[in-house]
Amino acid sequence: MFKQHYLFNTFHIIIDGLFASVPILLSFMIISFGSSEKAAGIIISLAIMVSTLTGLSTKFFSQKFGSLRTLIMITLLYGFGFFITAFAPNIYFAGFCFITAIAGYGLFHNVAFSYLTSNSGRQSLGKVMGDFTAIGDIGRIPFVSFAGFIAAFSMLGFSGWRIVCFTYGLGVLLFSGYIFVSTCYKKEKIDQKKSPTAAPTSHFPSFSLLRNPQYVLPISANILDAIASDQIFIFLPFLLFAKGIDPRIIGSFALAFTLGCFLGKVACGRMVDTFGTRKVFAISEVMMAILLVILVIGQQLYIIVGASLLLGIVTKGTVPVVQTIITEPIREKHNYDDIFAISNFCRGTTNMITSLLFGFIASSFGVTWIYDIMAIIAVCAVMPVLLMAKNIQPIAL
C-alpha cells in the first residue's frame, strides 16, 4: 500500500497539474463558445478568490477529517469539476465548474504544509519543503502540454478541450476513489485520527496571532515577496513584446523560467538547512531585484534568457524558504494550521490586488514600470526578516 508521504506527493502532482491546465483549456473554450478574453480573466480571478477564502477552513478540515482524507476530498472535487466541465453548454457553466474544482487549491497546500512541518525534523524541514514544492512543478509540464496539444484538435465531433476535461476528470475520480477506499477503510488506518496540528478550540485560524510581531514579520515578508515575484511570469510576455522579441521564441523564456523554478525550489530548500532561512531569503530577494533590473535593461537575447532562468530559481526558490520561515516563531503544533492559513490568505489577497494594479500600471505607463516596482519591493522584503528576533526557539519536531 502507498505510504502517506508518497500519496501527498502524488496528489500534489495532480493538483498542480490540473490547476495549471485551466488557463490553457479556458483559452480554447473561449474560441469554441465565441466569448472574449474578459470572461477568462473573470473566471481566473474568481477562482483564485474562492481558493484563497477556502484556505481559511484549513483548521476545520484538519480537525474534522485529518490531513489525508482532506487531500483525497479535494482531489475528488477536482475530478468532479473537470468531468462535468466536459459537458458544459456555455463558458459560464464551464467557468463555474472550474471555480468549484479549484476551490480546494489553497486548502490543499495549507494542509500539506502543516502536515509536513509537523512530521519533519527541524534540521531537514527546508529540504522537505523544497522537494515537495518542486514535485508539484513536475505535474505542470505533462498536464499542461497534453491539454494544449489535444485541445487544439477535434475527435468524433467533440472539441479537444472536452476530451481533455473528460479524460482528466474521469482519471482523477477513479484514482482518488481507489485511494479513498484502500486507505480510509483498511485495518491499518492511515491518518484516521485528528491531525497532529489540530487544536480542539476553534475551526478557523486565530488572527489574534498577529498581535505578536514575530508572527507579523515573516507574514509581511511573504506579502512583499508575493508582490515582487508572483506576477513576473504573467507579465513577462508583454515585456518581451515591448522589447521587440519574436513571439515564436517566447516559449523558450517560459521553459527557462519553469526550469529555474524547479531547480530553485530544490536548491533553496536544501540551502535553508545549511545556511538558515534568513540568509537564504535575503540573498534570494537581493538577487531577484538585480535580475529584474537586468531583465528590464537587457537587450541581447542570451542575457534575457539567462535572466529568466535565474529569475525562476530565486523567484520560486523562495517558496519553500517562506513556508519554513513563517513556522520559526511557532511554539505549539496546533498553530501550524493557523499560520499557514493566515499567511496564504494574505498572499492570495495580495495577488488578487497586485494583478489588477500591475495591469493598470502596465497599460497606463508601460510594462517596464511594474518590473522596476517589483525590484524595489524585493529589496524591501528583506527588512521584516532581518527584524525577526534571532533568539527564537521553535518547538522541536
Image (cartoon, helix red, strand yellow):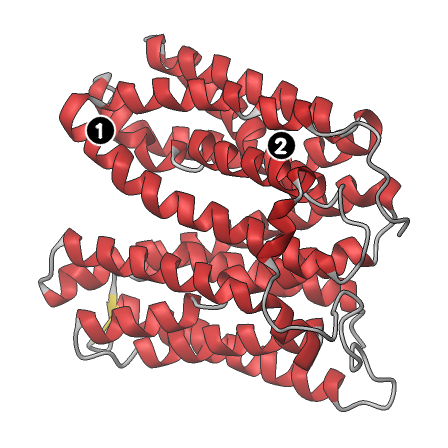
Name the mark on residue 261: none
Question: Which residue appears farthest toward the left when viewing the image?
Answer: 34
Nearer the observer: mark 1 or 2; the answer is 1
Residue 192 quadrant? bottom right
Q: Give the x, y percent position of residue 262.
A: 59, 38
In three-dimensional space, the C-alpha distance between marks 1 and 2, rounded to whole angstroms, equals 29 Å
Q: Is residue 314 above or below residue 214?
A: above
Element type at mark 1 = helix
Q: Position of residue 269 (x, y in %)?
A: 72, 36
**Rendering quarter of residue 40:** bottom left
Q: Secondary structure at mark 2?
A: helix
Find residue 264 and name its label.
2
Disc 1 target residue: 361
Answer with the quarter of the image where residue 337 lies: bottom right
Q: Amino acid at mark 1?
A: Ile
Against 10, is 328 above or below?
above
Is residue 194 found left or right of 395 in the rendered image? left
